[in-house]
Amino acid sequence: MNPAEWLERTARLVPDAPALLAGERLTADYRTFAARAAHLAGALAARGVRPGDRVAVFMTNRVEYLEILYGIWWAGGAAVPINAKLHPREAAWIVENAEARLVLLSDDVGAELRPLLAAGVAAVSVDGPYFAALFEAAPFGAPMALDPDAMLWLFYTSGTTGRPKGVMITARSIELMTLAYFADVDAVAAGDAILYAAPMSHGAGLYNFMHVIRGARHVVPESGGFDPDEILDLAARLRDVSMFAAPTMVKRLVERAAASGRNGDGLKTLVYGGGPMYLADIVEAVAVMGPRFVQIYGQGECPMCITALPREIVADRTHPRWRERLASVGRAQTCVRLRIADAEGRELAQGEIGEILVRGLPVMPGYWRDPAASAETLKGGWLWTGDMGAIDADGFLTLHDRSKDVVISGGSNIYPREVEEALLLHDCVREVAVVGRRHAEWGEEVVAFVVVDPARPVGAAELDAHCLDHIARFKRPKAWRFVDELPKNNYGKVLKTALRDRLEKEDT
């Protein structure tokens, strides 16, 4: 199914329904939204874009982002949304690797990209008069009918361990992800709104489809990004607002709500994922803002739909194992199967920790023009996620760490998340990241990078004693680094590679 067909159907059914909003300002109803996508598709086709051709998008969040995506799909093209926080040279590499015919960009991030583009690759600014003229082109007609295996979204991974890989997300993957949202994550009503505070080039943008189908509102904050006060104010005025957020964003939003005496009024659903949500943080979030939270676990390789932890379980405090369930990432979504395997692919018993494998129709067919990486990640019909976890008797999956983050000290596996969870129970610890450092005798040793409350300083001795009260002695950090902040990417993920690099430099 071509998502542009969903937009066309909704525009026919509820043409006057509000569709696109910049803050509280309405910029398009569904009739206008669909018409602009059809005109843009016509303009792209006139420029030589054919079904399957890649069109890159290098923009900060704005309502035009959705018009562009649907215009690309209307013409049968594949969108290549690029993280707006990337360096222009990194963005240029992605454009070249994707063999994009055209780049649509915003001047705030794209001006330096233009001179780096290869000959023959056109660039169009959404801030200039030429972009507005594209909407005067003859409309494309009906959205292009697409094969289920047609690539619609070429998603480039974060590239923290080298060049990013292009994940081929197909029409089938998007359709299954969308249906799984309705089945496993949340219902969507016509009066709802989806707010894009996280980058639309990634997970937040993938949640547009279900809201287009229902004829809901799409809201881009005037700031174009994540501002807790702006979000809390918008939600209170717009009502029934949902959003996708990284756990660090949820934590900041909850802290601001608590500090300002608010409870998230107007927020319907906060879907969190994309990084570890620590138990103490989600307990606090529910205490401050109530049953508004749903957790998902996914990867670009299986977009947004590996597991889900529904709001009733996130908010439950009556089940005898509610803490264990809340510390999990939920159960397999309807359209996938899970298994835990050892390095040879042998399935492990219930409760044993191994690599998480996923199988199902949403899983990518492979990486863009990278057969070696595809063969390494897709084996025997299963996606090898690179994440370590265990499944309990009720089917709840608990993440332990990325396989590369596990610390092996003296022959014992130490999972950094377990140490981080223990440290976050200390009242003075605001953030923590645990990594391994090479050790001549033990192989590796545990090092903790800690951000403490400046008003309540705490030292290594106290935190060491705290760890001994909560985890085995061999798991506690052997070295401490107190820092003002942890390095993160723009999705809120802690860059443990940067922390390991820092330790390596210290040792040289």
Image (cartoon, rainbow, N blue to C red):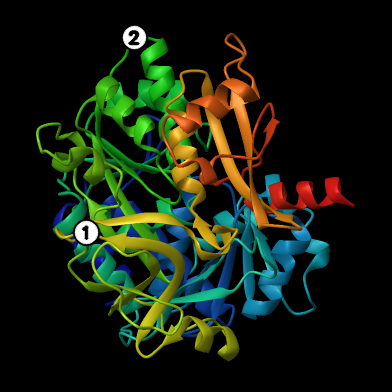
Report whether 422 appears left or right of 122: left
Q: Element under label 2? A: loop
First in residue order: circle 2 vs circle 1: 2
**As displayed, is residue 247 above or below residue 431?**
below
Residue 25: percent from left, percent from top:
39, 31
Is residue 137 visible in the rendered image? The answer is: yes
Report which residue position mark 2 lands on.
261
State the image quarter where residue 54 is shown: bottom right
Look at 66% across and 56% down and name the residue there: 444
Report which residue position mark 1 lands on.
392
Residue 106: percent from left, percent from top:
64, 51
Report the front residue among 79 and 466: 466
Q: How many numbered markers are drawn?
A: 2
Q: Amino acid at mark 2?
A: Gly
Per the rendering, the mark at residue 136 is none
Q: Element under label 1? A: loop
Report whether 447 appears left or right of 307: right
Residue 75: percent from left, percent from top:
43, 77
Report the front residue among 501 and 298: 501
Report whether 399 appears left or right of 127: left
Is residue 142 visible in the rendered image? The answer is: no
Look at 30% across and 59% down and name the residue there: 209
Report whether 413 appears left or right of 182: right
Q: Amino acid at mark 1?
A: Asp
Residue 80: percent from left, percent from top:
54, 69
